[in-house]
Amino acid sequence: PFMCLVVSGGHSHILMVRDYGAYTLLGCTQDDAAGEAFDKAARVLDLPYPGGPRLDKLANEGDENALRLPKPHTEGKYDFSLSGLKTAFINAVHTMSQRGETLPKADLAASFRKAVVDMLVEKTMLAAQDTGVQTLALAGGVSANSLLRARMRNECEKRGLKLYMPALSLCGDNAAMIGSAAYYRLLKGEIADLSLNAKPSLPLV
């Protein structure tokens, strides 16, 4: 078994993976997903859509300690909560704007990115420690985030854990993800007839 952090516009999950299609949910977001939070923060900074990659690029030019943001509490040990973080960020930006201040967009982007990545990495490493897994994987569109990739790599190296990350070219490729999932289902003989319909709100696990 290995552990997977799935982060995208719709998902922020920590999963224990026993086999293809066989998952146990350890933790998940209680509100906004990571990709959604990044896009909303980018919109407040007037960055064009898709905002997540643009916020990530801008953040590389800023001071990640410029804006102090709250550290949300969750009841679930491995769960995430990004709504309050996003709201605190938006309120800080609006307050600066109302005062007529020039927005230090790079610093704001860096501060928000750090707060989100801190939460994702800390919860994942806690789950890895508690379960004793030796292998981690990163998946979903937000797995392209440069700070998340760097932090996950560093933390895994410190703990002697193996880390697998998708190539940047595949991080946002939904067709590749679905095709891969379908391939392993097919190998198991898990097929459906043509009456099967799409369910956009179907839970991951």
Image (spheres, rainbow, N blue to C red):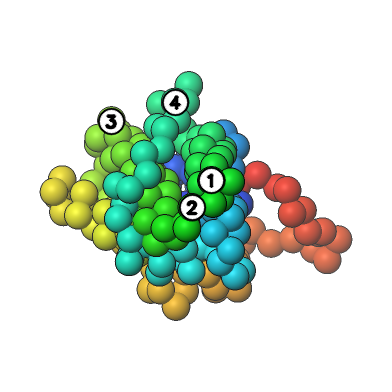
Q: CA distance from mark 1 to mark 4?
A: 30 Å
Query: Disc 2 on helix, strand or loop?
Result: loop
Using a 10 Å C-alpha cutoff, classify the residue at mark 3 as few (fewer than 14 neighbours), some (14 to 19) or many (20 or more): few
Amino acid under label 2?
A: Glu
Looking at the image, residue 175 lies above or below residue 7: below
Amino acid under label 3?
A: Asp
Residue for badge 2: 101
Residue for badge 1: 99
Residue for badge 4: 73
Earlier along the polypeptide chain: callout 3 or callout 1? 1
Q: Position of residue 179 (x, y in %)?
A: 58, 71
Instruction: Confirm or deny contact between disc 1 and disc 2 (CB under 8 A).
Output: yes
Query: Disc 1 on helix, strand or loop?
Result: loop
Amino acid under label 4?
A: His
Q: CA distance from mark 1 to mark 2?
A: 5 Å
The structure residue drawn at horizontal position 15% and vertical position 45%, both measured from the top left corner, is 159
Earlier along the polypeptide chain: callout 1 or callout 4? 4
Amino acid under label 1?
A: Arg
Please name which of the two marks, 1 or 4, marks the residue nearer to the observer.
1
Query: Disc 4 on helix, strand or loop?
Result: loop
Looking at the image, residue 171 lies above or below residue 85: below
Please name which of the two marks, 3 or 1, marks the residue nearer to the observer.
1
Residue 108 can be seen in this image = yes
Q: CA distance from mark 2 to mark 4?
A: 31 Å
Residue 109 can be seen in this image = no
Residue for badge 3: 130
Please name which of the two marks, 3 or 2, marks the residue nearer to the observer.
2
